[in-house]
Image: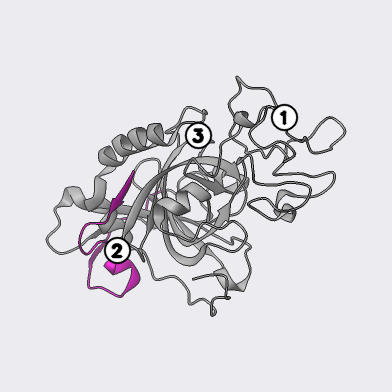
Amino acid sequence: MKRSWAAGLFAGALLPAAMAIAQSAATPAPPGATGPAQPTTNAAPGNSASEACERALLTDFDPNKGDLFGHDVSIWSVGKSAVMFRSGMTIDADGAPNAYNPQNTGLDDLSNAGGPGHWDGLAADRDGNPIIQGPDDPFPGFYISQTALVDWSKGRNDPMRYVDASKVPYIVLPGVLSRRFGIRLGDFAVVMNARRGIVADAIFADIGTLGEGSIALANDLGIWSDAREGGTRGGVLYLIYAGSGDHQPHSADEIESETNKIFQQWGGMEKLDTCAAGLPSPPHFQRAERNFH
């Protein structure tokens, strides 16, 4: 799914807006929360009660990306099994068959795949050496780039076993965070580029840093998708549905179909507008480096 936002969507998330905020009685914190949950019901003037967003702070998480991206990203529950946060987006090429090669001329810099003895982004043999694609593979001479989500029907030496970042819109989450809130590989997500007014669907397909998306997802959102230099330092909202997937990779069309059904059941664009507008303003970031916009 790639669709334009409804008029006015996310305006309250980017600029201060007058909102009616009703404080409800405190309830026990959801599993994994670092402190007592602070449930609130946020409804913009004119919204019905069914459109309200019940939100509870789960934790503040440092994405460990340096001062450019800021620190302590707030992670919220927004309805049953839904988790939301706002951050930037760095670009992940993992899973693309042309992501990495020995000459370091692939889609991404080889250093982002790890290093000898610890190749996070590359499939390796029993001795820890990266596996190189053969003459019948999509990119002979390139390494086989891997993702955490895999097609178990295919062998480790098959590049098609992994989720292709250049074709499939996916998000990346830290393992500690996904485990804490019951988010599993293969779960579905909605991702929003506030600056361009675009919403896209995605699947959780790789373990890494907070605020990272595949090349295909960045393209869907109108974000510079170059894995070496692209991305954006803010203005991206992530909405993940914990437990929504089946632990399996899916095509872009399947992701769109499944996520759209979940999104509509959750409350759709009207609820998203309310939830996004009610999020506290993020901290001020330092001036962007040249390779971000």
Q: CA distance from mark 1 to mark 2?
A: 49 Å
Tell me which numbered mark, 1 or 3, is placed earlier along the sequence. 1
Is residue 170 on the magenta stretch?
A: no
Label 3: how many Cα within 10 Å (few below 14, some 14–19, many 20+): many
Residue at image coords 59%, 56%: 227
Type of the residue with mark 3: Gly
Q: Secondary structure at mark 3?
A: loop
**Contact (CB < 8 A) between labels 1 and 3?**
no
Task: Indicate left or right for 272 with 48 as reference.
Answer: right
Residue at image coords 26%, 40%: 264
The disc placed on residue 94 is none
Q: Which residue is mark 2?
A: 10
The answer to whether 192 is drawn above or below residue 120 in the figure is below
Q: CA distance from mark 1 to mark 3?
A: 31 Å
Residue at image coords 16%, 51%: 49
Q: Which residue is mark 3?
A: 186
- Image: magenta residue range: 1-27
Type of the residue with mark 2: Phe
- Point out the residue furthest to the left here: 46
Q: Secondary structure at mark 1?
A: loop
Label 2: how many Cα within 10 Å (few below 14, some 14–19, many 20+): many
Image coordinates for residue 245, horizontal then vertical, percent: 45, 31
Q: How many marks?
A: 3
Task: Indicate left or right for 57 with 155 as reference.
Answer: left
